[in-house]
Amino acid sequence: MKVDAVIVGARCAGAATALLLARAGARVLVVDKGRYGTDTLSTHALMRAGVLQLHRWGVLPAVVAAGTPPVRSTTFSYLNHDVTVPIEPKHGVNALYAPRRALLDRILVDAAIESGAEVSYGLHVEDVIVDGHGRVRGVAAIARGTRLRFEADIVIGADGLYSTVAQRVGASPVVAGRHAAGVLYSYWTGLPADGYYWLFRTSGSVGAIPTNDGATCVFVGVPSGRFRDEVRGGPDAAYMRLLRTISPDFAVRLGEAIRTEPIRGFGGHPGFIKTSTGPGWALVGDAGYFKDPATAHGISDALRDAELLARAILQGTAAGFAEYERTRNDLSRGLFDVTDQIVSFAWTDDTVQSLHRTLSSEMSREVRALAALEPLTQNRGEELVSQSTGA
């Protein structure tokens, strides 16, 4: 089977890239080892850049129609006071949203399929196919015991933090983080929350994210070096103990709420930015750029970079791919550095407030860059076969 692009991973980064390429007329195959419509480990809070992308692509109405509550403010809780920031209408975005990943990923996959992409689940990619000149030409996969080969002009790794594609092409690190946080989270009903809530103490962080079905995602984070010891007695006991220790007032608020799902956890992983283009391949989402979820910007990163990469592929030149990597790194580096400092937990109350102001400034710069992009041309058909990927 030969296509223009094989995308490994059907989550938000891969599905969004497939959607944009298919709309432009590319023959796109998306393969994923999982199943359609499942949940995944995620904070699932969208920042303005992420909501802007969904709005620009015309898929935000489906998120809203599914009952995802609008988020109209963000509260930062510090040691001696809270700061609440209203979400001002700007660039066509008048609220933020935090859809469950089973919903968001499904909406993006459905839009990609409607645009002409083919999506196949239950396929585990084992390796990339490389020609005699060192150029990636496709992937080798296995499905229900059958080995398959898919050839493509470009292979896109959108397969997450432990990306097989990134490993097989030898994507090299450009930047490495020094810090990470471990997190426990679950979902609660009966907890009034009409905005994002982030609490920061040197002992840890607490957050509340309103999402679908009247539920609120409540998480607690601590430095990853402490995480294993904290959960040694089990995640349930650790979750409530940490909530009571870090924010006794917030723990009291949970008294009349009902936890509706098991507690899930992530031990943390230092962030990285990797080289994300090469001969016949590219990376998008966590495969090429990951930072600690403490700043809840991962999905917005993925949606941003999906468009930047799609534009490079449609341009089909080495200069286009170089611009993808340059722009991604430029828009990511400030966000990456400030996140790494926040999850060090080695700050004073004044310092973390300054870090949040820097974070806000970097997010605003990112939004301006995305808002300035001209709409992608659709239905380019045969013009689109990519011949160069920055080799």
Image: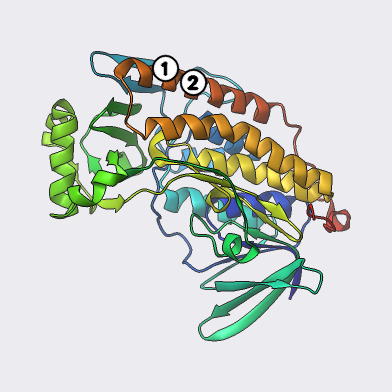
Q: From the viewer's perspective, is 177 left or right of 325?
A: left
Residue at 61% x, 23% y is: 365
* The furthest residue to the bottom: 145
Residue at 34% x, 21% y is: 75
As drawn, 180 above or below 119: above
- Residue 42: x %, y % from top left: 40, 47
Question: Which type of secondary structure does the marked residue at label 1 adopt?
Answer: helix
Give the camera-side residue of 280 and 224: 224
- Residue 349: x %, y % from top left: 30, 18
Quick one: quadrant of the N terminus? bottom right
Mark 2 surroundings: few (<14), some (14-19) or many (≥20) residues within 10 A: some
Identify the amino acid type marked 1: Ser
Question: Which residue position is annotated with label 1?
Answer: 354
Q: From the viewer's perspective, is 125 left or right of 244?
A: right
Identify the amino acid type marked 2: Thr
As drawn, 290 above or below 36: above
Question: Which type of secondary structure does the marked residue at label 2 adopt?
Answer: helix
Quick one: quadrant of the C terminus? bottom right
Q: From the viewer's perspective, is 319 left or right of 174?
A: right
Residue 82 visible (yes or no): yes
- Residue 138: x %, y % from top left: 71, 70
Question: Which residue position is annotated with label 2?
Answer: 358
As drawn, 88 above or below 369: above
Real-space Cα distance between discs 1 and 2? 6 Å
As drawn, 49 above or below 109: above
Residue 185 visible (yes or no): no
Give the camera-side residue of 230 and 159: 230
- Residue 325: x %, y % from top left: 69, 43
Give the camera-side residue of 181 and 141: 181
Mark 1 surroundings: few (<14), some (14-19) or many (≥20) residues within 10 A: few
Discs 1, 2 touching: Cβ within 8 Å: yes
